[in-house]
Image: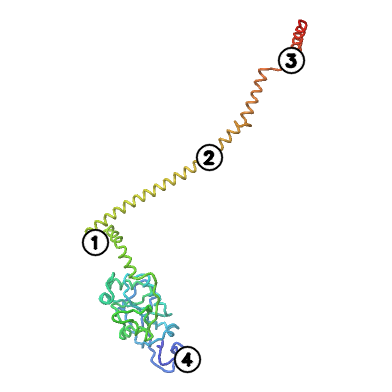
Amino acid sequence: MPVLTTDAESETGIPKSLSNEPPSETMEEIEHTCPQPRLTLTAPAPFADESSCQCRAPHEKLTIAQARLGTPVDRPVRVYADGIFDLFHSGHARALMQAKTLFPNSYLLVGVCSDDLTHKFKGFTVMNEAERYEALRHCRYVDEVIRDAPWTLTPEFLEKHKIDFVAHDDIPYSSAGSDDVYKHIKEAGMFVPTQRTEGISTSDIITRIVRDYDVYARRNLQRGYTAKELNVSFINEKKYRFQNQVDKMKEKVKNVEERSKEFVNRVEEKSHDLIQKWEEKSREFIGNFLELFGPDGAWKQMFQERSSRMLQALSPKQSPTFFVLSLRCVLGQSHKKSIHT
């Protein structure tokens, strides 16, 4: 595939090798042999000194417009991003994702500064350089890792790795006596800004650890780390271990309370069901009682029927003859009384 030429451009400013017009000048066609972006994620990204770009084709300067339009498959846009990458987190990964997706066809090189440079210009790190190198190799967006990256980018470094653009957030990075170490990159038109992820940074993570130091020290003592490994004094070790015992007791009490609450809740549920059943049974009992013993109940009717039967049995109906004899007796007694008077 023909290489891009900078001295032959179309009317749109795009190199003619990217347009439909044939180039006005002939030159030897040299295939690009630049490393290609990773298409498989079954292995970590290589180190630059293990797979450096030995392409013989001239590395022409691209504009951002040309890069965004797209380049030939064998000529990916080589984007460089650098940093310390201590305690590699999602903010780092998002910045590298942005750098990787700046252009349709890009090859992302990530430079990681060594411990010596970092401790000299920025400060002590939690992870050593070997750990930080390995963390970057396993990020899906990274195509190549450059170990012992320079603190300030030099033309020689950019030329050696055939870097087209440098990606970093646009906040001026003052260090090593400079107000902005990327100033010369911006002036050369090789700087492409990325956005920082708010709420997450290495400093934030370290601040959390320092703030909650006692909690983490106690946790690691409980997991088997020694006081010497944690740089904890004898008195603090005893204090932390005592606090761990107190926490265990609190946890046991909490578990007992939870089980007690669960038992009480079950008893309340069962008692509520039992009360409901009792109320239903009592209403049924009262209803049956009223039906039997109420004013118009069956018991009253039965009692009245039995009473009438007993009265009939005790005082049977009198015959007419007996009634006539009784009347005559009464009348006779009345007649005798009248004669005597």
If you read the primary sequence from the N terminus, does the residue marked by circle 2 or circle 3 appear first? 2
The location of residue 37, given as percent across then percent down, is 38, 78
If you read the primary sequence from the N terminus, does the residue marked by circle 1 or circle 3 appear first? 1
Determine the CA span between mark 4 and mark 3.
147 Å
If you read the primary sequence from the N terminus, does the residue marked by circle 4 or circle 3 appear first? 4
Q: Nearer the viewer, mark 4 or mark 1?
A: 1
Helix, strand or loop status at disc 3? loop
Residue picked out by circle 3: 319
Residue picked out by circle 2: 279
Q: Indicate the quadrant where residue 208 lies.
A: bottom left
Q: Nearer the viewer, residue 333 or 24?
A: 333
* Label 1 with label 3: CB-CB less than 8 Å: no
Helix, strand or loop status at disc 2? helix
Determine the CA span between mark 1 and mark 3.
124 Å
Q: Amino acid at mark 1?
A: Val
10 Å crowding of disc 1: few (<14), some (14-19), many (20+): some
Q: Residue at x 32, y 67 (%)?
A: 207
Determine the CA span between mark 4 and mark 1.
70 Å
